[in-house]
Image (cartoon, grey):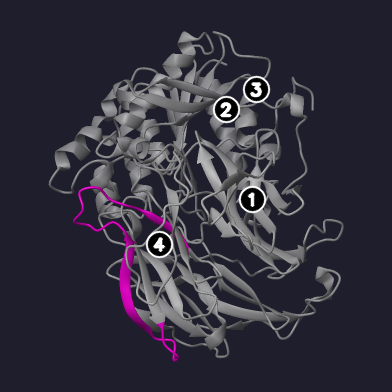
Amino acid sequence: MSLQQPLPATTALGRSPVLRAPQLLGDWVLWLEQRPHEKGRTTALIRRWKETANTPLELTPAPINLRSRVHDYGGAPFTATLKEGTLQLVWVDDNDGCLWFQAWTGINGASAQSLNALAPPHRLTSPSDSALGGGVIDHARSRWLGVMEEAGCDRLVSVALDQQEQTPVIIHKPADFAGYLALSSDGVQLAWVEWQQPFMPWDCSQLVVAQLTATGALKDCHVIAGGEQSQAQGISVFQPQWLPDGSLVVAEDSSGWWNLMRHPGAESFSNHWQRLWPMTKETAMPQWVLGMSTTAWDGEKLLAAVCDQGEWRLQRLGLDGSTECVEQPFNDLADLNAANGRAVAIASNSTTGQGLLELDLDLGTWQHTPAATAVMEVNAISVANALWFEGSSGQRTHAWFYPPVGGADASSPLLVKSHSGPSSMARRGLSLAIQFWTSRGWGVVDVNYGGSTGFGRTYRDRLQGGWGVVDVDDCAAAAKTLIAKNCADPNRIAIEGGSAGGFTTLACLCFTDVFRAGACRYAVSDPSALATETHRFEARYLDGLIGSWPDEQDLYEQRSPLRHVEQIRCPVIFFQGLQDKVVLPQQTERMADALRRNAIPVEVHTFPEEGHGFRDSEVQVAVLESTERFFRQHLNL
């Protein structure tokens, strides 16, 4: 592709499947593939380790769709394991919300095509209004253990693998939320994470451990790490995991950084945690979905994905406190899994798209299989530069700046991206959606505004009580910094974001004079409405981000773009899924109607089958193309 040729939206989006949750099973690699060209259907694939010559076997062909709805955001919709030469797979099918099971033999064959299903898949649970996910397989008792969300409650449940159409058996009733189950290798101890409203799991959560009796019941449940609601400063725990020697590892942030700590293990846990690897770097991320993984036991040491100044690297951590870097070229890593000197992860960098990374840790070699064929020459890719600037209250703030192909100057249009969450982070892996803009002469700045993760707890806590102020100041300051550097035209500055990023977008249009157009996907337009209308997982999220509801309702009204809509003087385009349970469609309708009454140019695009986040490739392409056309029209490009 030449440097002058704009990247088509149909190439930037809709072609590449999204890879997730790779897992090593002996000499096999299994992973999930979400396919935009199949309206976002997710399926499980398997192949031999590093065997790319043969086509992987699809274990869950259409119409099976692997998706959990626990806490609405889901995650961890499948559990796979090897037992006595048989591959076992348990999954949640989004078509009925039920748990399903299937097993395959031929695991000793030369390729995936040697696998043979023992029987057709069968449904383990009966259809119901509950949501299941985040499970592990208890081999000793031939059952699945996981999370069930039902009637506004989380429950830990068990489901027998040799029965059909059963009702899950409740084995534990948390006070509120639960997830991230970890079963010890001997099957006698279970660890998991709990948290309670008004906290989110990355604000304050607890690590719970219990013994499993011979019959599979839980006993002696007790909290062994994390923060309590009564504490002035919350402590968050992330991804408990048992090591083969019976010790327990978890990440927690009492030091101000999500660092790993280890407990040697005992029948009665006491405060004997060993903080063997202190660092001013992060080894975790906010737990929006179940099943997230940044560390794994590789058979000899802990392998950890470590975030430093917005970039991810791999380190091996010895139980003697030693650390060593794992040399490989990728700085955007997720879903780490390891075993027996090998590791897999989903990886990308500035010039290579998302793909399956396979590492031989003993030999120091790696192999990366991209999810899709490269569509851009390396010299046509705009590579992100770290941009540090003075943000809200003069605090040092980070962003990634992608200059337009050919270089930025004072006439370049600029797109400011406000990420979702708002506790997420702007990552550095290759984004063809960003290259879509840079190939058209736009600069793009992806802002890690205060509240973003990857920079420590203090940076993350900047947004506590400050949502709609700190993020707005930071996005505006990033744009002003680039204008001052003669990298952007002050009359051609646009901003876009989805969900919480959509709120930041609207607030920037409302409370600053920097931006000339905005694009919002399923945007929060009125925090008061979000506090009263949203789903259970985020029902009290704004207590921390803004203030206690309804006691501090005046703050909600002060931050609300809808309540101050008369201050928006530039055109806005909206995109909304009609199945959205997080930001209800009427929020977008109310905001658009208010802008129209003020004679502000507005477009609204709705998608009947989409929810919170667009999965269908046709929808993704339509959103990108419509946004670019809208900006071009209203910025005189």
Residues shaded magenta: 212-240
- Please state, as top left, top right, bottom left or bottom right, where the N terminus lies in the image: top right
Left or right for 598, reference 292 = left
Q: Label 3's element?
A: loop
Structural crowding at the residue carrying mark 1, measured as other residues with C-alpha within 10 Å and reported as few (<14), some (14–19) or many (≥20): many
Q: Earlier in the sequence, mark 2 or mark 4?
A: 4
The residues tagged by marks 3 and 1 sit, at their Cα atoms, a distance apart of 29 Å
Q: Label 1's element?
A: strand
- Comparing marks 1 and 4, which lies closer to the viewer? 1
> Visible in this render: residue 395?
yes
Left or right for 169, reference 305 = left
Camera-side residue of 245 and 163? 245
Left or right for 299, reference 452 = right
Residue 346's mark? 1
- Please state, as top left, top right, bottom left or bottom right, where the C terminus lies in the image: top right
Residue 71's mark? 4
The residues tagged by marks 2 and 1 sit, at their Cα atoms, a distance apart of 33 Å
The residues tagged by marks 3 and 2 sit, at their Cα atoms, a distance apart of 12 Å
Q: Label 2's element?
A: helix
Q: Is residue 76 above or below residue 349?
A: below
Q: Earlier in the sequence, mark 2 or mark 1?
A: 1
Residue 440's mark? 3
Q: Find disc 2 in the rendering and name its residue.
A: 629
Q: Residue at x 46, y 48 (%)?
A: 285
- Residue 516 covered by magenta stretch: no
The residues tagged by marks 2 and 4 sit, at their Cα atoms, a distance apart of 35 Å
